[in-house]
Every structure is written in C-alpha cells, then in structure tokens.
Image (cartoon, grey):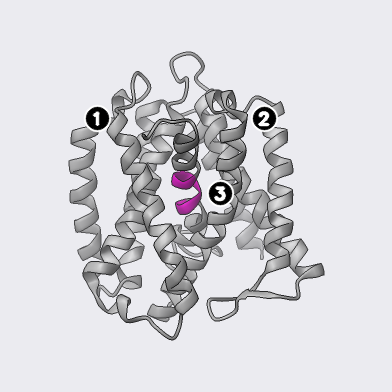
Amino acid sequence: MLTRIITAIVLIAAVLAWLFKASYPIYAMGALFMYAVSAYEMGPLIGFKSRLSFLAISTILIAVLFAVTTPGNFPVKIPAYTKYIVASGLIVWLCSIPLLLKFPHDTSWHNSKIVSSIIALLMLIPFTFGLLILRADQYLQNFNTGACVVLSVMALVWCADSGAYFSGRFFGKHKMLPNVSPKKTIEGLIGGLIIALVGMFIFIKLGFFGSFANNPTALLVASVATIIFSVIGDLVESMFKRLANIKDSGKIFPGHGGMLDRIDSQLAAIPVFLTVYFLMNGELF
C-alpha cells in the first residue's frame, strides 16, 4: 500500500510538472515517451513474442508522421489533416464495441498480428497527436491554457472513474460486461457520468477548457462521449490482457503496473473528445 501511495504522489507531481512547467518541445518529448513505453508494453498483448518487434513498427510509423506533420509548429498552426489522424482513433473504439460484446466467444481476430497491430496503432497514434493538439491550444497567448485543457479532459476520466467506483459499490446490481470486467456495472457507469459532468461544469467555470469553451454544445457532447468511451478504453485493455493471460501490462510504476494500465481510459478519451468536438464544430467536413 505504501508503495502505491508513494508512486501515486510521484506520478501526480510528474504529470503536473510535465503539463505546466515543460516547454512545448519538452512536452512533446514526454508524449513520445508515453507512446514508446505503451508500444513496448503492447507487443505481448497483441501476440508478439518480442516486445521490441511492435515497438520498432510503431516507432517507424510515428517518426514518419512527425516528419510529415511537424508537431513543433502546432502552437502556431495545426494542419487540417492532422485532425483526421486524431479522428482515425474513433474508428477503433467504435469497432471495439462488437469485439467486447462477443468476448470471449469470438476472439479469432486476435490471431492475426496484422489486425491486432492496426488496432493497437489506432489506439496509440491518435492519442499521442491528441495530446499535442490539446496542449497547443492558445499556447502563444497563454502558456498554461493548453495545459489546463489537457488536465480537464484527463480529469473528466478521473471523475468518471471515481464516480463509477462509489456508485457501483453502493448501487451496482447490473453487470456491464462480466466476461471482460466483472466489477463494472451499469449503475457505476451512470454514477460516473453524473460526477464527471459536474466536474466538467466546474472546469468550465474555472476557464480550464480554453478555446473549446467557445462552443458549449460541442463541448458538452464531446465530454459525454469522452466519459462513455473512456470506459470502453478500459474494457479494451482488459480484454487484451485476458486474451494474452497477462495481469499487468508492465512494471514501470511500482504498485500500479505499466503505462497502459495507467492510461488505458485516456487512450480513448483524448481522441474521442477532440473528434466529437471537431465534428460538432464543423472542422472535419
């Protein structure tokens, strides 16, 4: 327990420093670090015997995308096509719903390393670019605006997790997907949604959503979608771990498992938030 507490304190301090103290280039390096560690941990979950194989594939692909999109210029201008890279993440989260519903009766897709690799890449790449786009919001006008936006989107997930835990514990009766995650309930999902929406309104009042608050309707719809899909992100990682018969994705965080164990919900939350907001704001079509 002490190890978990100490690790949590260090993680919180590191995340806050990464968000509010690091310059944009250093922030981008932090996002790449998360991407690389996640890719390293993802290998065994999708059937690779060596962790380095999928890490090599994902490194080459992100390097090519970085060379094309030049993220260092995002604070000045974000290329329109970059938003489609983020939006591609919505594909995997929508397609993962039938996979979750069929688990464990139909898992044939997991036998294909190509299919599993595509799913994994669409989980990691849109998330990484989403982090970069969110942090770039009004960066040149106010250094901390984008940091507050990233923190707010992540906090929606944390609020939802906390609300779901307590709602599920006291009111949970109807299991959501017991074959994937036995403890998750419908009541927990509803409770988490309510608490997260309360958090959203608080963040808006505090001015934490930056330019995204310019369209309140889009922000509300995007936040609801984010909360719902964050649960799907958690369930998908749980499904992968069950398929690979692995308890924790890694050991980088003592007492807390691996990087994927910490950001599984965020993998879905970040790209879904941006994609739904872009759609509602007319930025994709």
Residue 211, given in percent of the width and then of the height, sits at 53, 23
Check disc 2 and report its element: helix, strand or loop: helix
- How many C-alpha atoms fall within 10 Å of the one at disc 2: few (<14), some, or many (≥20)? some
Q: Amino acid at mark 2?
A: Ile
Residue placed under numbered mark 1 in the picture: 70
Check disc 3 and report its element: helix, strand or loop: helix
At a point 80% along the width and 69% down the height, the residue shown is 171
Residue 54, given in percent of the width and then of the height, sits at 24, 62
Q: Amino acid at mark 3?
A: Ala
Residue placed under numbered mark 2 in the picture: 204
Q: Quadrant of residue 1?
A: bottom right
Check disc 1 and report its element: helix, strand or loop: loop
Q: Residue furthest front?
A: 285
Mark pair 2, 3: CA separation: 17 Å
Picture layout, residue 167 above or below residue 75: below
Mark pair 1, 2: CA separation: 31 Å
Task: Assign the C terminus to one quadrant of the image.
Answer: top left
The front one of 246 and 66 is 66
Q: Which residues are magenta?
A: 267-272
Q: Which mark is residue 225?
A: 3
